[in-house]
Image (cartoon, coloured by chain):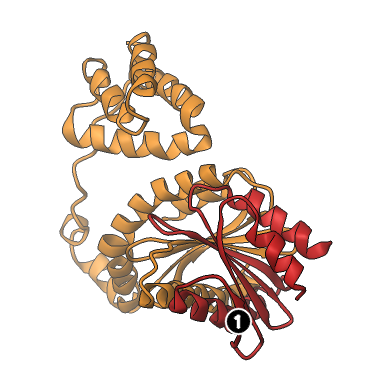
Chain colours: A red, B orange
C-alpha cells in the first residue's frame, strides 16, 4: 500500500493512529502505540473468512468496532493485508468509513 | 422471544436477526437453509469480542461491511444479537432498539427459555396421553398464574398517545420502550386511569433528562 495513502488516512479528522500488517501478521507500518491492538489488527484477516463462509454473502471489506470508553477501530481487509485505523469514539463511523474507502479507491 | 426478534427485524433496514448464546443460535429469522452457517458466523463474531476482551479492549459493537449489506453484532452480558441490514441505516436507532430488546432477551433466555425448551424435549408424548385420560383435568394441568389486570379502552387509548409521543423522541424504538415501561408499571401499579401518571413518569426516565423529559411529561399530562 502506498505510503501516501497511509498519510492521507492518518490526516483525517479524528484519526489517532494507523497500522498496516501483511498477510503473515507482520507490521508494515504503524503509528498505533498499543502492541496488543496491532496484534488484533493482524488477527482480523484470519477470522473474517469464517464469517464470509458462514453467511455466503461475499467478502467482508471493512470491519468497524465500537464500545464504551474505547477508541473506535476500523479495519480494512484486502488480499490478506489488514489496515487498522484507530479513531476518536465520538466521531461518526459511517463518515470515516466512507472517507477511508474513497482514499483507498483513489 | 420470537416477538422480540420480530420487533427488531421490523426496524427499518433490518433484514434478518438472531440471538446467539452459549455456543448456539437460540432463535433466528435468518433463512433456515443457512442455519449452521449463521451459527458459525456468530461464533466467529464472538471470537472477535473474546480477542478484544483478552487485550483489555471493551468494544461491544461490530459492523462488518459485506457488499451492500452490513452485518451488525452487539455483545451483551450473556448473549450476542446479530443483524443483517442495509448498508445505509440509522445506526443509533438500531442500537437503541436492540439495547431495549436485550433487557427482555436477557430475562427470557436465562430464566425461562432454556429450561422450558429442555423440559419440552424431555417429556415423551406417550406418557402424557394416559395421564390425561385417567386423571381429572384439574389435577394434571399446571395452575396458571393469576390473569393480569385488564386495561380499559380508555387507558389503552392514553397509552397509544404515549407511544406516539415517544416516537417523536425515540423513533421505532419507542415500541420497545413502551412495552418495557408498561411491564414495569403493571408490576408496581394497578393499571387504571389514576395510575397513568406513574406510567408517564416511568417512560420519561428513558428520555434525556431536562427539556426532553419535561416536554414529554407536559404533553403526556395533556392526555390524562
> Where residue A46 appears, x then y in whole percent?
59, 84
Q: Is residue B136 visible?
A: yes
**Residue topped by disc 1:** A50
Camera-nearest residue between A23 and A16? A16
Q: Is residue B61 left or right of residue B83?
A: left
Count of number-bearing discs: 1
Q: Residue furthest top?
A: B222
> Where residue A99 appears, x then y in whole percent?
71, 54
Q: Quadrant of residue B203?
A: top left
Camera-nearest residue between B96 and B176? B96
Camera-nearest residue between A85 and B184? A85
- Image quarter (top left, top right, bottom left or bottom right) of the C terminus of chain B: top left
Residue at (32, 27) in percent of width and height: B209
> Where residue B18 appears, x then y in whole percent?
51, 63
Residue at (28, 61) in percent of width and height: B112
Q: Judging from the image, what secondary structure is the residue with disc 1 in? A: helix
* Chain of the residue on which disc 1 is drawn: A
Q: Residue furthest right?
A: A106
Residue at (26, 16) in percent of width and height: B193
Q: Is residue A33 above or below residue A14?
A: below
Q: Is residue B187 above or below residue A80?
A: above
Amino acid at each position: 500500500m502506498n505510503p501516501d495513502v497511509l498519510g492521507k488516512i492518518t490526516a483525517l479528522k479524528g484519526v489517532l493512529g494507523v497500522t498496516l500488517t501483511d498477510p503473515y501478521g507482520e507490521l508494515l507500518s504503524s503509528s498505533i502505540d498499543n502492541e496488543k491492538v496491532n496484534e488484533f489488527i493482524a488477527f482480523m484477516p484470519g477470522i473474517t473468512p469464517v464469517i464470509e463462509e458462514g453467511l455466503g454473502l461475499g467478502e467482508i471489506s471493512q470491519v468497524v468496532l465500537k464500545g464504551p470508553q474505547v477508541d473506535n477501530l476500523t479495519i480494512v481487509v484486502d488480499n490478506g493485508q489488514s489496515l487498522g485505523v484507530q479513531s476518536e469514539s465520538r466521531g461518526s463511523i459511517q463518515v470515516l468509513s466512507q472517507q477511508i474507502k474513497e482514499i483507498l479507491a483513489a | 422471544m420470537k416477538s422480540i426478534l420480530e420487533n427488531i427485524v421490523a426496524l427499518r433496514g433490518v433484514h434478518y436477526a438472531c440471538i446467539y448464546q452459549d455456543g448456539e443460535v437460540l432463535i433466528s429469522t435468518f433463512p433456515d437453509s443457512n442455519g449452521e452457517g449463521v451459527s458459525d458466523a456468530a461464533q466467529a463474531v464472538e471470537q472477535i469480542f473474546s480477542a478484544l476482551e483478552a487485550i483489555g479492549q471493551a468494544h461491544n459493537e461490530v459492523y462488518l461491511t459485506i457488499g451492500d449489506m452490513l452485518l451488525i453484532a452487539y455483545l451483551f452480558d450473556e448473549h450476542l444479537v446479530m443483524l443483517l441490514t442495509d448498508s445505509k441505516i440509522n445506526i443509533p436507532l438500531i442500537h437503541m432498539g436492540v439495547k431495549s430488546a436485550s433487557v427482555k432477551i436477557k430475562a427470557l433466555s436465562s430464566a425461562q427459555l432454556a429450561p422450558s425448551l429442555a423440559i419440552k424435549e424431555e417429556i415423551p408424548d406417550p406418557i402424557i396421553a394416559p395421564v390425561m385420560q385417567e386423571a381429572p383435568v384439574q389435577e394434571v394441568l399446571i395452575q396458571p398464574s393469576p390473569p393480569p389486570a385488564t386495561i380499559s379502552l380508555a387507558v389503552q387509548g392514553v397509552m397509544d398517545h404515549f407511544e406516539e409521543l415517544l416516537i417523536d423522541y425515540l423513533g421505532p424504538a419507542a415500541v420497545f420502550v413502551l412495552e418495557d415501561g408498561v411491564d414495569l408499571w403493571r408490576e408496581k401499579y394497578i393499571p387504571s386511569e389514576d395510575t397513568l401518571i406513574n406510567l408517564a413518569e416511568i417512560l420519561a426516565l428513558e428520555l434525556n433528562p431536562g427539556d426532553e423529559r419535561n416536554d414529554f411529561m407536559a404533553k403526556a399530562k395533556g392526555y390524562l
